[in-house]
Amino acid sequence: MFVTLLVLAAFYGFAGDSGAVKDSPRPHIVFVAGDNEYGSEETFPLLAAELERNYGVRVTVLKSHPDENSEENIPGLEALERADLAVLYLRWRRLPKDQLEHLRRYLESGRPVVAFRTTTHAFNYPPGHELEKWNAMAVDYLGGPPGWGRGHYHYGHRSTTVVSHAPGAGGNPLLQGVAKSFATPSWLYHVLPNFPPAEAQVLLTGHAVDSEKPGAVDNPVAWTWKNRAGGRVFMTTLGHPGDFDVESFQRLVINGIHWSLGRSGKVRWRGPFPMNVKYHGFRKR
C-alpha cells in the first residue's frame, strides 16, 4: 500500500549533473521503508509530510506489507519508474524478482539515491538464490559495505555516538546549519577501512560513547558519492528514530535530499519539525 501526497507550492532552483533533477518544479520523491527495527515505517511518512508541506515536493511513501516484518513484499515499487529521487531505509529484505526489478531499473538509470543506516544490508537472499548478488548492493550503489559482517558491525546497543564535521568538510553546503558536533542515540556503525570509497566525500564522522567493544575507532557516518551508474548518492549510517529528533540531523537530511535533487544554492530551512518516534527494536512476528 502506498500513499501519494500532492502539494500546491511550487519548487524552485534546481540544476545539477548526471542523476540530478533539472528544471523540475515539483520533484517526485519516493520513500521506501522496510527495516523491522528502527521504525522507518513511522519516521518516513513524517519526514515526507514535512518535505511536502514546506519544501514543495510530491511524495510517495511505500512500506513493507502487511507490516514491517514482511520481508518479501513492498507493494507499489512501480512508483520508482516516475521518481526523481529514491529514499531508502531497508533491512534484510527478500523481495520477489518483479518487485526488485523496479529498484534495479531505478538505480541503473543514474538517478539519485538517499539511503539510511541498515540499507548497507538491504537484502538477505539465501546462498545460491538468483538474486543473492543484491545482498552486496551497497558496494555498487551506496559506497557502503557488502552486507552485514565481514568487518561491518556496530559498537553495541547501549552505546551512543557523538557526530562531528569530517576534516575539511566544514564548508560543504550539505552541512549548512549542521552543528560542528552533536550527540545522537545511534550506536556507531563500523565501515572502515574500505568504505566509503576513496573518491567519496565524507561529511561527518562518529565517535562511539560507552562502546561495548574494545578498540572503538571513529568512523564515517555520512558521505556523498557518485555510484557506478553515475547517480548522486547521499548515504548516512545514522537513522535511529531518536536521531530524527535532533535538529542538526534534520538539517543534514533536508540538505542531503535537496543536494541529491541537484538544487543549487542554500536550502531555505523551515525550522525543526516534530518526529517523536520511539525505537522499538525487533517486534515479534
Image (spheres, rainbow, N blue to C red):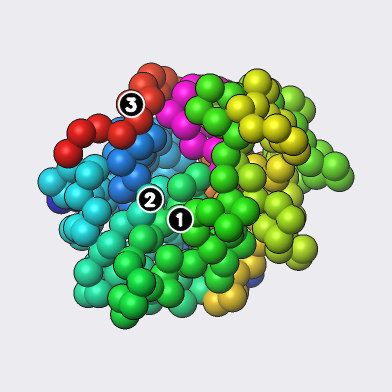
Q: Amino acid at mark 2?
A: Arg
Q: Per the image, is 54 magenta?
A: no
Q: Nearer the viewer, residue 149 or 113?
A: 149
Q: Is residue 220 above or below residue 183?
A: below
Q: Residues within 10 Å of mark 2 (few under 14, many from 20)?
A: many
In three-dimensional space, the C-alpha distance between marks 1 and 3, rounded to whole angstroms, equals 19 Å
Residue 40: image tag? none
Q: Look at 34% across and 45% down and name the residue there.
A: 35
Q: Nearer the viewer, residue 177 or 237?
A: 237
Q: Is residue 32 above or below residue 124?
A: above
Q: Which residue is mark 3?
A: 280
In three-dimensional space, the C-alpha distance between marks 2 and 3, rounded to whole angstroms, equals 15 Å
Q: Which residue is mark 2?
A: 91
Q: Position of residue 110 (x, y in %)?
A: 51, 73
- The majority secondary structure of the magenta stretch comes to helix
Q: Secondary structure at mark 2?
A: loop
> Counting residues from the N terminus, which is met first, the one under dot 1 or under dot 2?
2
Q: Look at 22% across and 44% down and name the residue there.
A: 69
Q: Nearer the viewer, residue 278 or 127?
A: 127
Residue 121: image tag? 1
> Counting residues from the N terminus, which is met first, the one under dot 2 or under dot 3?
2
| Magenta stretch in the rendered image | 237-250
Q: Position of residue 191 (x, y in %)?
A: 65, 51
Are the residues flagged by discs 1 and 2 in contact, CB closer than 8 Å?
A: yes
